[in-house]
Amino acid sequence: MKKIILLTLTVLVYSSVFSQSYKSFFLPDELELSKDLPFPGDLQGYTFGEWHFSHDQLINYLQELSDKSERVTMWKYGETHENRPLYLLAITSPDNQEKLENLRSRHLNHVQNKLAQNPKEDPVFIWLGYSVHGNESSPGNASILTAYHLAATKSKEVKRILNHSVILIDPCLNPDGFTRAANWSNMHIHNTTVKTPYDRQFREDWPGGRTNHYWFDLNRDWLPAQHPESQARLEMFHKWKPHIVTDHHEMGSNSTFFFQPGVPERMNPRTPERNIKLTKEIASYHAKALDKTGTLYFSEESFDDFYYGKGSTYPDVNGSIGILFEQSRVMGQVIKNEHGELSFADAINNHYTVSLSTIRAAINMKTELFSYQQQFYSKANKLAEKDQVKGYIFGDENGKVKVYHFLKMLEKHEIEIYGLKKNIRINGKIFKSGSSYLVPTQQDQYRLIKSIFEKRTSFEDSVFYDVSSWTMPLAFDIPFTPVNNQRLMTHKGSKLEELRMPEGKIYGKASNVGYIANGNNYNIHALLYQLKKKGLLAKVATKEFSTRIYSKEYHFSNGSIFIPVNKQKIKPDQLHEYLEKLSTKYGINLVGMPSSLTDKGIDLGSRYFVPVKKPEILLVAGEGVSSRSAGEIWHLLDHRMNISVVLIKPEHLSRINLFDFNTLILPNGRYNYNEETTKKIKFWLEEGGVMVALENANQWLRKEDWISWQKKETPDENSSSTLPYGNRRKRRRINSISGVILEAAIDPTHPVAFGIDKNQMPVLKNNNSFIKKSSDPYATPVTVKEKPLLTGYLSKENKEKVENTAWCLVGKKGKGKIISFVDNPNFRGYWYGTNKLFLNAIFYGNIIR
Ligand SMILES: [Zn+2]
């Protein structure tokens, strides 16, 4: 790399000179370039390849390119949580640009085999996606270099490429994280280049720029689609159905470069074999291009393509070829690593090189890619014909809000959904028309549907880069069943065209006594919080009851909320009006009670109705805490439930008045406090505080002897045996638990399980903590059952270890309560089943006796 001297005072004047130097570093001298188009950095006053472009600068540059070049169009397709725009570019020949929409719709007809293709005329669609992990900056920066190359190069090769392809560029999939990381890198750039890996420029502060606003890994969200970035992108993906999708990343800073294929035996079996063959053929183009510069690389190890929620894997189950690239990390300007020195410009250059090699491969392999994609869909329909499972029925009369969220997710994946013509009893479950749905397997998305609904417990390999299972209706805790009988498919009702959040209403007349909302609604805590925020009196039913009102029977579960009319600070008609508003907004039905007397169970004046306090929540978020665990909680409370939460740095707990709060949440993490702070927290707890602790946070509480947290004894492995050294890594990973779904016994009479209405539910196990049940018979509301495996990979040893362990435990300290979750109830935002337990812990922790 050519040496660049930084002149701090004259950067602007000299920037074009620097750019010129960098331009020749990146682009071969013989390339004839359009003089009308600016090189990245020319307009920004930034030396491209030396400074990290922020998201705004990327977009400004691309906007300029699209304004000036006939080959480039660009449009906004969505917004992030922080209101940053998400953009997609289409780069192709000016001729193709003019008929772009036509080319797109022809292409979709090809995909569905409605139209024969002509490889001489029809373009191949290539999607290049960069920096889904925001602090992996070299991909995002490479995106604009790639765009420049395609827009500015006058060569015959590029003209041929543009005639034969439509190149879609998503320059940055995670603008919020990318901006955090760019700021971090730039604010630590030295005048004298510092390359030592522990310099601040290479070490971000918590939470870092990898994740989005709520600290979620967007490269796991392609399937759950819980975030606006993924939701908008999925729409674009299905609108274009590209033949190839690239996914550009950075990995550890002592690595080299990786391109797919990944570990062959860790491929998802739903991905066709031919996908792997084509990926390998495409890989030969990357190899050739990187060999030219002597860049070292590897493939077929470390990374896999099993979990369909990643950017390189989701395309594989959607008729595209997904390709992962991983570049050794730079973060600052130049870093010393085990292989020597690596500059940010080198890293950009590698991503740019493989972007171009992907395009070259796509052009040369056009005919094969066309036929692969068509066959993918025609074969999906044949596979569906052979499959005994003809569809999946799911639904929950009492869980319409949760079902709505589930339907919304399915809809993002272009899965066809139908209603039911009439009620069906199948496999011991009743599915009611109006609240249940049918997804037939005979449709284009056959493979994805199977992957979302099926339970799998046998695997070719036992090592997983990510979770081994993600059966979605289990995570959402929605009753579902496969349909094996073709005859039952005649119950298929009309196709679901428009999805709407269910609206609630108030049943019965305006009441003198009060109103009841059933605790089984997913949004019950959102409603309750609003009531408390307004200073209204609300009580939770700690026992179930039922009553007949105007000849209709109503049953209310534990955890139902009673809002009395009397003694409120607003008038009865104002209360009615306010409740009507809330019930519509949150999709919760309320019942106006004509009397305090109920037919069965507790009456409304009973002491089993316990007043609920407004939770004043502190959430510990900072160094030592898992940002993902904290982010999932923040997102659940703040974004989904509209519940206010104060994020506090761990070290600030010693400085504030804890008594301004009644709830302290400790996400998964490492905690350690000095004697004085520990004493302060202990005093707060003993005076009636509620603590909710997740996973490893409980280690600290155990150390302080505040909870009983005992490991279940398990027979030790035979330590005298000798094993092959070469297998040690794999062996270690075989026994680590990667996202399995287990069946747990729950006690619906316990405040932690209020509103669940049954005795068991699916829970996630994603760690190796095996904790004994409490010696207090009332203090383990959630226990892993015997033979609990519902889906996923569990080693034989772990199968025994996990049986009968606690999944959630409750402890007491003075007047205070500690609710300990052994595993994660809020995983990736899509565990709508167990996150209700977590919300219960926050709202009802203080009423546990
Ligand atoms: Zn990454």
Image: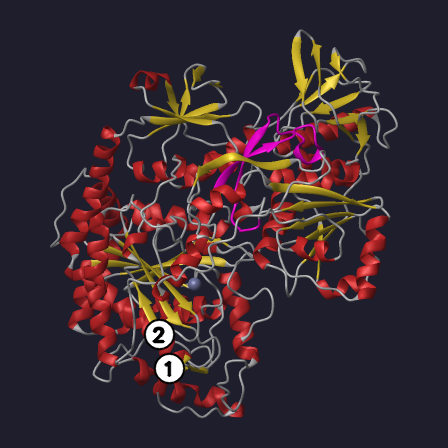
Q: Amino acid at mark 1?
A: His
Question: Tag count in the figure?
Answer: 2
Does residue 509 show up?
Answer: yes
Work out which residue is located at the far right of the displayed protein and give it.
567
Vertical side of 55 occupied by 395: above or below: above
Describe residue 773's horizontal placement relative to residue 798 as left or right: right
Considering only vertical position in the picture, is 216 above or below 802?
below
Whether residue 520 sits left or right of residue 496 in the image: it is right
Q: Position of residue 389 (x, y in %)?
A: 32, 27
Residue found 47% across the figure and 42% down from its top:
799
Q: How far from the left and from the top, in percent, is residue 178?
A: 49, 66
Residue placed furthest toward the top: 551
Asked if residue 620 lies left or right of residue 237, the reply is right
Magenta-colored stretch includes residue 563: no
Ligand 1 is in which quadrant of the figure?
Answer: bottom left
Residue 643 lies in quadrant: top right
> How far, Cα to Cα, is label 2 from label 1?
8 Å
Q: Quadrant of the C terminus?
A: top right
Residue 725 is tagged as: none
Answer yes or no: do the residues labelled 2 and 1 have beta carbons within 8 Å?
yes
In what element is the residue under mark 2? Answer: loop
> Depth check: 120 or 400 in front?
400
Residue 259, by quadrant, is bottom left
Q: Residues within 10 Å of mark 1 (few under 14, many from 20)?
A: few
The residue type indicated by label 2 comes to Thr
Please say if 832 is above or below 511: below
Residue holding disc 1 = 339
The span picked out in magenta is: 741-769
Residue on which disc 2 sits: 256
Q: Left or right: where does residue 735 sit relative to residue 583? A: left
